Image: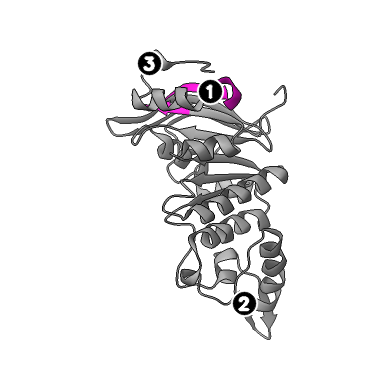
């Protein structure tokens, strides 16, 4: 793209004892770009993502944010940069309300005498227009999120990332086990993120969804990057063939 990438990984490794889960991965993600991160189960995708968000810091390698080297050793570090992750299983807490899920761990409080209490009015005034902007219609912001559809749940998690000014959102299988309509809604959310200049790393096994929203495809196999191309440079069928073949070394192409 000719510009300094928002995020650059250089020769990132992750070891768990004798297991070498990520093997020298280098990749870039530019501002407002949607990158599809693909690979078979056990390829190292989720482990690589965990190094980016600091859940499981890299054993070695370098990370650059807007061209400057940074250390990512914890979720606090990645959030300080503007990186948010949305996991299918961990995106929301069922027993909490919609508004509590948006502000989870970062609630707005007000001072009442010697006490600091949650300012639900202020939080609702922020959440209501945010959900409206995303096209989400919910009965009440006090509604426990367990009563929401799968698409609405993912929408609330993505709204959280947008409100807290994420510069990059990582989505790990965001449409898994969702209805067709809910999947369409999540893809619409991803397009909104890109339209707002927010970068996205999308992990998905659904080739149709990948080709609908991503700009570039990175393929991981056995912990190594074996493919890094613009989606127009490779067909969906070629990707599926590589995955079916285990994305072996013979399928290397445009690795850089």
Q: Which residue is labeled 1 in the image?
A: 228
Q: Earlier in the sequence, mark 1 or mark 2?
A: 2
Mark 3 → mark 2, Cα distance in angstroms:
55 Å
Compare residues 12 and 200 and report the one nearer the observer: 200
* Mark whose residue sits in front, 1 or 2: 1
Mark 3 → mark 1, Cα distance in angstroms:
14 Å
**Secondary structure of the residue carrying numbered label 2:** strand
- Quarter holding residue 113: bottom right
Q: Earlier in the sequence, mark 3 or mark 2?
A: 2
* Mark whose residue sits in front, 3 or 2: 3
- Quarter holding residue 225: top left
Compare residues 155 and 206 and report the one nearer the observer: 206
Disc 3 crowd rating (10 Å Cα; few below 14, some 14-19, many 20+) is: some
Question: Residue 208, image x and y in percent?
Answer: 51, 38
Q: Quick check: can you spot residue 9?
A: no
Q: Are marks 1 and 2 in contact (CB under 8 Å)?
A: no
Q: How is the image coloured?
A: one colour
Q: Which residue is labeled 2 in the image?
A: 118
Figure quadrant of the N terminus: top right
**Residues in magenta, as a range:** 219-233
Q: Quick check: can you spot residue 48?
A: yes
Q: Which residue is labeled 3 in the image?
A: 249
Question: Residue 121, image x and y in percent?
Answer: 69, 78
Q: Residue at x 43, y 36 (%)?
A: 45
223 in relation to 193, above or below: above
Q: Is residue 151 magenta?
A: no
Q: Residue at x 52, y 49 (%)?
A: 75
Q: Is residue 112 left or right of residue 148?
A: right
């Amino acid at each position: 793209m000719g510009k300094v990438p928002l995020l650059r990984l250089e020769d990132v490794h992750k070891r768990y004892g004798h297991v070498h889960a990520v093997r020298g991965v280098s990749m870039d993600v530019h501002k407002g770009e949607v990158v599809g991160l693909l690979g078979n189960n056990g390829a190292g995708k989720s482990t690589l993502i965990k190094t980016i968000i600091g859940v499981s810091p890299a054993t070695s390698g370098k990370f650059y944010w807007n061209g400057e080297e940074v250390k990512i050793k914890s979720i606090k570090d990645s959030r300080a940069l503007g990186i948010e992750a949305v996991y299918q299983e961990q995106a929301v807490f069922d027993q909490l309300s919609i508004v509590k899920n948006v502000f989870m761990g970062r609630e707005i409080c007000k001072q009442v005498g010697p006490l600091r209490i949650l300012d639900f009015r202020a939080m609702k005034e922020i959440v209501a227009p945010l959900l409206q902007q995303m096209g989400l219609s919910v009965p009440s912001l006090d509604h426990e999120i367990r009563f929401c559809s799968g698409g609405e749940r993912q929408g609330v998690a993505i709204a959280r990332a947008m409100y807290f000014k994420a510069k990059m959102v990582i989505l790990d299988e965001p449409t898994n086990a969702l209805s067709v309509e809910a999947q369409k809604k999540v893809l619409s959310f991803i397009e909104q993120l890109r339209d707002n200049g927010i970068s996205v790393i999308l992990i998905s096994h659904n080739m149709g969804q990948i080709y609908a929203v991503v700009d570039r495809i990175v393929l991981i196999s056995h912990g190594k990057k074996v493919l890094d191309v613009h989606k127009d440079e490779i067909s969906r069928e070629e990707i599926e063939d590589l995955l079916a073949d285990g994305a072996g070394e013979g399928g290397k192409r445009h690795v850089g």
